[in-house]
Image: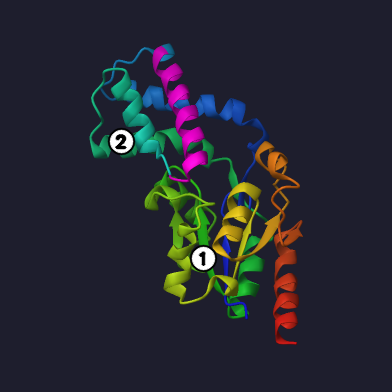
Amino acid sequence: MLGGVIFDLGSTLIYSTGEKNWGAIMPRMRADLLHFLNANGYALDPAEFLTRLAENYAAFDQQRQTDWVEYTTAYLITQTLKDLGQPAPPPALLESARRAYYAYSETLYTVLPDAHATLCRLRAAGLKLGLISNASDNENVQRLIDQAQLRDYFDPIIVSAAVGLRKPNPRIFDLVLKPWGLQANECVMVGDTLGADILGAQLAGLRHVWLTAYADHPANHAHRGNILPEAEIASLSDLPALLERWSAAETK
């Protein structure tokens, strides 16, 4: 019997209106970070800083995709400054630097139009709802959750930056299943990314649903045909009926 549903966040419950244009958004974010640091006591050569930041980002991103652990934005900034012979920022300054880094991108996110209605239906059906997000900055995710007014639906909320693990590492799902007291096969993972959400659910023994509304990105193209979801839906509004069919089939 199904008892809980775990959701991804980005491109599942919220999406960025700049999703197809990260090639322009990321340079803006890095420039904003550079401006903040230089305005707060650092004397950084722009070209040198931006080059090293981009190199470190690429290296850390490759590594976290390989070993399924999280490399945080705080680590990225601190390591980049260290590489350039600069001191690590104190905690308060580092927090403000991260906020400056994400400020522009956060203005681009909006909640999927059917997210609230779907979550209300699932909650009314008595299902537990949880959230697991792969992201390199916990506070950034928490702000996005509040911006979309999603917090009240979920318990627990797990962010990879806060726990050090990333989907598809099956251990991250235990952080939801254990508090719920449910077995993996009693829960469903819903997400847009085959290599993280669907593979992670498969490795952890959860049922799984691939949401395709905002799933047209290169990572999924690489896995299409190799990682096979149990079910696909084009809209969140399709989810309640699907889960009702699964529950009805289990009671026969």
The front one of 56 and 146 is: 56
Q: Which residues are magenta?
A: 48-69
User: Which tag is nearer the camera, tag 2 or tag 1?
Assistant: 1
Q: Residue at x 64, y 61 (%)?
A: 115
Name the residue carrying label 2: 94
Give the mark, 2 or 1, whose residue is nearer the N terminus. Answer: 2
In the rendered image, is residue 31 in sight?
no
Q: Secondary structure at mark 2?
A: helix
- Residue type highlighted by circle 2: Leu
* In the depicted structure, whether residue 121 falls above or below residue 213: below
- Residue type highlighted by circle 1: Gly
Give the prevailing secondary structure in the magenta stretch: helix
User: Residue 16 placed where, x, y %?
Assistant: 61, 42
* In the depicted structure, whether residue 40 falls above or below residue 152: above
Name the residue carrying label 1: 130
Q: Residue at x 61, y 53 (%)?
A: 199
Asked if residue 56 lies left or right of residue 22, the reply is left
